[in-house]
Image (cartoon, grey):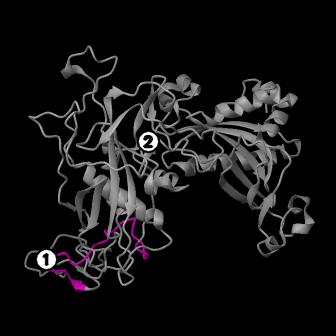
Amino acid sequence: MVVIGQQHQIHQPRADHPRSTHTHNPTMAPPAIVHLPNGHNLSVTPVFGGLYFKSVDAHNHQNIFPPGWTITIESEDNEHPITPGADSELPGAPRYRVHSYRQPSLQSDHLFISSISNPPNERTPSQFPASSPTRQIAMMLWATLYWYFQQPEPDAKMTNSTSQGTAEAGRPKGEWRININREGVFRGKQLMQKLERMGLIATEDSAVGTSLDPNTPDGWSAMFVSRRHFWQLDPRIYLFTSNPQVNSALVSHTHLDSRPDSPALGVPSSRPDSIVDNAGPVTATGGNHGLWTPPGQFKSSSHLPTFYPPAPAQYIFTDNVRHPLRPKPPRQGETFYTRYIPSLGEYLSFRVASLSKRPVQHIGPVSDPTPSASPLRASASASDSHVPTIGTLNHEMSDGDLLHKWMNDERVAYSWGEQGPLSHQEEFLKAGLTNKHSIPVIGCFDGKPFGYFEIYWVKEDRLGSYLGYQVADYDRGLHVLVGEQKFRGPHRVKVWLSALVHFCFLADARTETVMLEPRVDNTK
């Protein structure tokens, strides 16, 4: 929607803009100082093209932020839609005219980090581990949102074609959210995916998508953060110290000398009145002597976040069914589950199905340690012999070809009813990749595909309409298909079925039930 090279003056509104009046100045003066929960301070300064966030404590050796970063916020003018044309019909093109940011809007603001300031010289300590750039960016984004959602709240009333005739007091209220653009610093190939899996951003487009280009913004161009979602995020996940803090303002561990009962009258307390840590008592002073790391499940010896809980629940409607906002699935061809099966002596893995016309390469563990002993590893290079459990297997059939073969099997066709030409299976696979509530999956034993599966959310599936109140928000269901004869049998079924159920419970800790819906005439 926006390009980095665009520069906008954010101080004053244009005089010809319909929102500009002589009686009201919409210019928003951001606070000079942002006080973060960990004791760190940031200054926010309007600059040409955006807002500059600068660390006030840059001289502090325990500073966790870079010297500064610049963000760009632009707003869509919903009152002036763009006339349909060639340019407006391009993917990702804005529907409304864009103007510079003046004050928060309900859902029309778009934000991205345009640049990050580098240390002025080599003597400036870098407080971020070089191996954790994503967590650094997540921390900067969190601090930016901490400032944004404390700005004056916009009017929550929404006007659309349905409510425009309703009295203003009776119009529905929308949720305050800001859109996160895949621009600037956020253009990284995997960055938006990582931020979403960290729970910081979300999207309503919970489908895999049909694009084969890993660099495409398809599916990751509609990311947002709502205020309700943001204030449910624990700051300890995103604010951390990279060095041990000696004189901490809060204790970073549990005291061993806590009293098991109430103090007795006249008996002196064995505990000091002041909070004590390993460095001794902490005295209250007016200055900021450093940052603190709160106790809890997010603390580690490396002072980096080690645990990301499930994202706070946000609800939307699909076909008049209220359900949680679902996380974005992995990309096409991405392996999301691997486990070694001792009873079979093979590795079981699941990956997302792909529309690629070429066979999907398996990159992952295989059971055969000798490249020359197995025809499946005939294409392995000599260097692979140094890591014998890692192999790349090339197959002759694409996922579309595999589905065409399996669906036209008489046994499979009886249950699925998707037999037909290759074009039919390609459309079937495309429908699965664009489904927001289901993931098309290819199962593999030692990298060799053996079956097709669908992992879906029961709440918004047609099965949920039959079960009604018995379905919890995070219950999942399975559709299963074993296409290769040599991989059939009850000893294999209990392996891949238990693995699918295992993944469902691992994917979200709130999942309570995994459902399977066999045909009524399936006596097996």
Task: Residue 451: name its quadrant.
Answer: top right
The disc labelled 2 sits on which kind of residue?
Met
Q: Nearer the viewer, residue 119 or 294?
A: 119
- The answer, for residue 309, to whether it is visible in the render is no
Q: Is residue 329 visible?
A: yes
Query: Could you say whether the residue bearing mark 1 is in a helix, strand or loop?
Result: loop
Q: Residues within 10 Å of mark 2 (few under 14, many from 20)?
A: some
Question: Which of the 4 image quarters holds residue 424?
Answer: top right
Q: Is residue 524 left or right of residue 60?
A: right
Q: Position of residue 296 (x, y in %)?
A: 36, 66
Name the image quarter holding the N terminus: top left
338 to 369, vertically: above or below:
above
Which mark, by number, is residue 484?
none
**What residue do we see at 23% from left, 42% from top?**
103
Give the labeled residue for mark 2: 1
* Magenta region includes residue 374: no
Q: Can you identify the residue that label 1 sits on?
A: 284
Q: Which residues are magenta?
A: 280-303
Q: Which residue occupies 20% across, 16% down?
A: 167
Q: Main secondary structure of the magenta part?
A: loop
Kindly check if marks 2 and 1 are in contact, taking CB atoms under 8 A apart as contact.
Answer: no
Residue located at (30% from left, 53% from top): 50
The quarter of the picture where the C terminus appears is top right
- State left or right for residue 192 relative to residue 66: right
Queried whether the magenta region covers residue 295, the answer comes back as yes
Side of 270 where 7 appears, left or right:
right
List the single residue furthest toward the front.
16
